[in-house]
Image (tube, grey):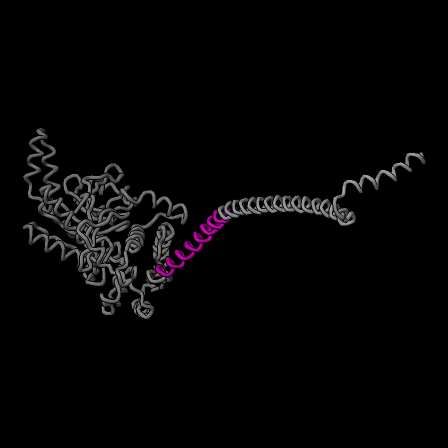
Amino acid sequence: MKFYLKYFVIIIPIVLSSCHEKDYDIIGEARKLLLNSKEKENIEKIEIDKKNEIIKKEEKKENIKTKKVKKKETIKKSRILKKIEKTDRDNKDNEIKRKEKKDKSREKILEHKIKKIGIMLPLSGENGKVGKMILNAIEMALFQTKASNLELVIKDTKADPKIAQNAFLDLLERDIKFVIGPLFSKTLGAISEMVDSEKISVLALTNNTNLAKKGIWTFGVDPQEQTRRLLKIALEKDFKKTATLLPKNAYGLLLFETLSNFSMNNLTDISRIEFYENTIESQQTAAKKISKGFEKYREYLNKLEEQDNTETSFEEIKKVDKPFDSVFIAASGQVLTILSSQLQYNFVDPKVIQFLGISSWEDISILNEPALDGGIYTTTSGLYHNNISKIYKKYFEIDMPKIAMIAYDLVALLNSLEADNNNFFSIDSLINKEGYIGLRGLFRLDENGKVERTYDVKQIKRQRFTVFEKAKSSF
């Protein structure tokens, strides 16, 4: 080993010496080699680092790009969802806001368009029961009317003219534009001079057309119009001599005027007229007086009936000069049964003489009176009130009075009024040629306060009311 080591030491200097042509800095070269190697390593490391850095940067860029893309997509998606959510919510919120705004707007409009209706009825005292039945119909109509903007201001007149005046003044102070009522002529007469058609419209329930004027409409069924209709029917049936029984009051005088005018205009004989008071004695006396001459007429008929030839007898009967061929009885209920039975008792035979009447006859209490069988009378149509009448009876446990049916119609009529551009309601807009169908048939208003109606003609047959001739379906 020592031998190899000895020769190794000797050989190295020789080799190194022989290979060097000039001075050679071995240490420098060694350093150089070391530096080159290190530098190379460093360079490689740097390049690797650079590559890694580039890769990292690229990865980072990619990551950032990816994140941005993802974020962008996420944000986009998120915005869409958010927008949808916001839109849904906004739509709901906006819908609620719009509804609230609409409701407030509607309330505001309704506030301007509210129609305050004065109600003047006798709700206490002697006629309180009738007044309450009418008020029931008004409130029922209001309840059944959809989207109504009517507001009732109710006043009790007690059927007293002075109380009616004070009630009407209070309604004027409240700036009420429409009044339903009063019920009676005396209370309407008490406020008539206070009615200014520019400020208020009164829809009265009385049938006294003498009180009708611009600003006051009388909606009660007109007895004069019914009487004229009835007399025309009688004239068509060749009844030209008519006797008349009338109550001794304003109503009777009103009908007397109608009968007299019809007689003059149509050249008919209505010369026999008797007035009766509200006593049985007075009614019996009136019936007896108007029947004068029928006792002799009956005697003559009896002689003819004894003959064998009945056809000849009938012809003879037709030729006999009767005191009258028809009798108009302006009465109702018990008074009507008394008058008709007394006429028959005094030889006025309903089989020979035509008994005539108006809508006051339509009361089931008279159907049992034999003298009225075959009698004819005029009345409003009964086609339209059956259902309402049933509902009324169900809730109030009483039949719906006919005057209450008119009040029911008035609520519907006023509810149909439309405001003009100045939020003003005028009853003039209800005046037209066609008219309206109410619970008591077809009616229309005229500009002077009268209310025109069409009428059925009915007949009493075998204790029933039957239609003799239907009302017109149009004016």
Q: Is residue 60 left or right of residue 193?
A: right
Quarter of the image for residue 311 reads top left
Q: Residue at x 9, y 29 (%)?
A: 308
Residue 288: image location, x then y, percent: 18, 51
Query: Vertically, is 417 above or below 231?
Result: below
Quarter of the image for residue 128 reads bottom left
Q: Residue at x 36, y 44 (%)?
A: 390
Q: Per the image, is 100 magenta?
A: yes
Q: Residue at x 27, y 63 (%)?
A: 422
Res. 285 visible in picture: no
Query: Vertically, is 190 above or below 328?
Result: below
Magenta residues, as a range?
81-110
Quarter of the image for residue 191 reads bottom left
Residue 14: image location, x then y, percent: 83, 40
Query: Vertically, is 200 above or below 416?
Result: below
- Kindly report the secondary structure that dominates the magenta region of the rendered protein: helix
Q: Residue at x 41, y 54 (%)?
A: 98
Residue 287: image location, x then y, percent: 19, 51
Nearer the observer, 415 or 294: 415
Query: Vertically, is 170 above or below 440?
Result: below
Q: Is residue 245 left or right of residue 56?
A: left
Residue 24: image location, x then y, percent: 76, 47
Quadrant location, the N terminus: top right
Q: Residue furthest right?
A: 2
Nearer the observer, 285 or 458: 458
Res. 278 visible in picture: yes
Q: Per the image, is 372 magenta?
A: no
Q: Is residue 127 left or right of residue 273?
A: right
Nearer the observer, 353 or 292: 353
